[in-house]
Image (tube, helix red, strand yellow):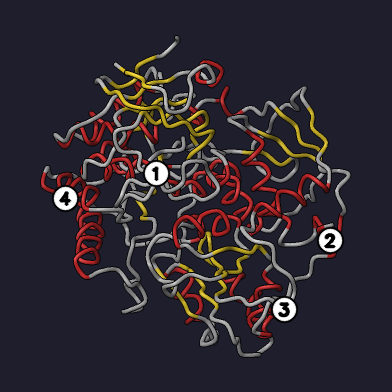
């Protein structure tokens, strides 16, 4: 069945053959309803086993913090059965949307089959490995058959940029901000419309967490699976003819679209969420340094993977100020308090999915805004660079 | 009318047009209702409609949402996309492998879609 699904998908996409893959990352282990559990259990009962090293994306449960997820008992049981089925298929229990920060880093040019849109963008863009944007179910089918359709971003032709975005005239202080990168990603997703975009005029050294945040936002607001940054990302390319000069006002508008309501300093905020993609250890350290030992008056939900929590433990980092969520996150399963409210986040991906998936309204801000708002117990945002 | 049938079947119903949609985050998998307040038709059910999306976007979990809609019989009667999208196709492919009822999937370029009115009856086969 697994190979049949791979072949049929390849046919739909016009692939002329299958390509052997080096690894897989499975997004299909998140419970959306019983159908996905039944499918995974069918793969198990058919004797399926993954043929390549395979990591798992988030599930619908936090297996490390009992009671964190407020899923109805029968749904929680089905979600657990689904997670168990993927383990029986031989996948590693990583339960993270940032597998590339949990030691799963394919080499430049390697063909892989990854699910989870942010992981796909990171894998293609930052690592220079090659994966198409696979939907749930194809990822596990490719892992079992060890092959994927040779199509889309597996092929040289589809990885070449057709639009050059020149960031050279942007305010350098804005570009230096952490909060710039998810906004740039959100703008990219809204603008790219199927094109591969190359950026020029950006700094020559960009922190990996910034690239991760940019890719996640781009893959949320659009179907971006790959972009290039001149001098930064590893894949060489020829500059495309078509050039777009990016102006500050375009980004200001993109930033505004990441919030679902207008708000002003001092407004009530009900929750703060960070960690989409999953928080890295560096991000934990940065958030802690913004807090400077002060206690939050508003809950800060920090979504992360068990690989990072192992680091937190090793460094004896005090995370008692946070509501830590592991193995899952706030937009894929019920964690936030009932009744909704206003949520502040520094994640472009959370900003995009929070309202439809949780009912909370969203404000986008920087990591520093999240810390200051948490401490003040009301909205604090530094917006001087965004006008 | 240039409609290229990617996955076979017959489905008809009133067209529900969206400029863009990620099925995950855009449709509640339990009820089949559109759930993104930023998009037109929010709150309406996709069940029995011909879902026409000019630019399919977003999450790879969209296959799972569609599979759940098919399994729970809350699915649209057909889906028409502006371009080939394997994520949407996979939900239907897996349903077929599981022996569940499926729906046709077609591609029609956005400029052709523009000639079809929202709410018009359409048959996809």
Mark closest to the chain's N terminus, 3 or 2: 3
Up the image or down, A4 lies above or below A209; here it is above
Up the image or down, A7 lies above or below A165; here it is above
Residue at point 20%, 45% (across, down): A39
Disc 3 is attached to a residue of which chain?
A
Asked whether disc 3 touches disc 4, contact meaning CB atoms under 8 Å apart, the reply is no
Q: What element carries label 3?
A: loop
Pointer 4 and pointer 2 on the same chain = yes
Mark closest to the chain's N terminus, 3 or 4: 4
Q: Residue A266 carries which label?
A: 3
Q: Which mark is residue B44?
A: 1
Q: Within 10 Å of the Cα at label 3, are there few (<14), some (14-19), or many (20+) other Cα atoms?
A: few
Front of the two marks 3 and 2: 3
Residue at point 37%, 54% (across, down): A55
Front of the two marks 4 and 2: 2
Real-space Cα separation, disc 3 to disc 4, in angstroms: 50 Å
Up the image or down, A325 lies above or below A25; here it is below
Front of the two marks 1 and 2: 1
Residue at point 48%, 68% (across, down): A304
Disc 1 is attached to a residue of which chain?
B
Q: Mark 4 points at which residue?
A: A41
Real-space Cα separation, disc 1 to disc 4, in angstroms: 32 Å
């Amino acid at each position: 069945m697994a190979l049949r699904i791979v072949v049929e998908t390849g046919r739909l996409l016009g692939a002329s053959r299958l390509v052997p893959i080096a690894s897989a990352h499975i997004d299909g282990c998140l419970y959306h309803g019983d159908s996905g559990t039944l499918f995974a259990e069918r793969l198990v009962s058919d004797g399926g086993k993954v043929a390549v090293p395979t990591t798992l994306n988030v599930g619908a449960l936090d297996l490390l913090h009992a009671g964190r997820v407020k899923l109805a008992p029968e749904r929680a049981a089905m979600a657990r059965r689904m997670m168990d089925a993927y383990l029986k298929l031989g996948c590693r229990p990583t339960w993270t949307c940032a597998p590339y920060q949990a030691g799963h880093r394919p080499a430049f040019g390697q063909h892989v089959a990854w699910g989870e849109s942010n992981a796909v963008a990171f894998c293609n863009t930052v690592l220079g490995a090659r994966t198409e944007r696979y939907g749930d179910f194809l990822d596990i089918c490719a892992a079992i058959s060890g092959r994927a359709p040779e199509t889309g971003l597996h092929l040289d032709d589809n990885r070449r940029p057709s639009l050059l975005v020149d960031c050279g005239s942007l305010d350098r202080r804005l570009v230096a901000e952490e909060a710039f990168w998810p906004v740039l990603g959100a703008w990219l997703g809204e603008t790219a419309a199927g094109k591969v975009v190359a950026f020029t005029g950006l700094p020559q050294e960009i922190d990996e967490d910034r690239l991760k945040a940019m890719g996640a936002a781009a893959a949320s607001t659009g179907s971006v699976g790959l972009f290039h940054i001149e001098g930064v990302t590893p894949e060489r390319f020829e500059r495309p003819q078509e050039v777009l000069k990016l102006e500050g006002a375009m980004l200001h508008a993109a930033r505004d679209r990441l919030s679902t309501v207008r708000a002003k300093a001092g407004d009530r905020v009900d929750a703060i969420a960070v960690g989409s993609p999953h928080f890295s250890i560096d991000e934990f350290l940065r958030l802690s340094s913004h807090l400077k030992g002060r206690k939050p008056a508003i809950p800060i939900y920090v979504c992360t993977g068990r690989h990072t929590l192992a680091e937190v433990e090793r460094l004896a980092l005090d995370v008692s100020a946070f509501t830590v969520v592991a193995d899952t996150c706030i937009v894929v399963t019920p964690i936030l308090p009932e009744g909704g409210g206003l949520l502040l986040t520094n994640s472009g991906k959370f900003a995009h999915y929070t309202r439809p998936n949780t009912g909370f309204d969203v404000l986008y801000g920087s990591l520093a805004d999240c810390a200051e708002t948490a401490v003040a117990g009301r909205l604090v945002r530094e917006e001087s660079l965004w006008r | 009318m240039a409609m290229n049938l990617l996955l076979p079947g017959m489905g008809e119903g009133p067209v529900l047009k969206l400029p863009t949609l990620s099925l995950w985050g855009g449709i509640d998998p339990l009820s089949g209702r559109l759930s993104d307040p930023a998009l037109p038709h929010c709150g309406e059910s996709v069940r029995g409609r011909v879902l026409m999306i000019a630019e399919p976007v977003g999450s790879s979990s969209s296959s799972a949402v569609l599979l759940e809609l098919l399994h729970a019989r809350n699915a649209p009667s057909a889906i028409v996309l502006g371009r080939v999208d394997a994520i949407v196709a996979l939900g239907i492919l897996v349903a077929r492998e599981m022996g569940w009822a499926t729906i046709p999937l077609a591609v029609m370029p956005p400029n052709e879609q523009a000639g079809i009115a929202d709410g018009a009856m359409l048959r996809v086969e």
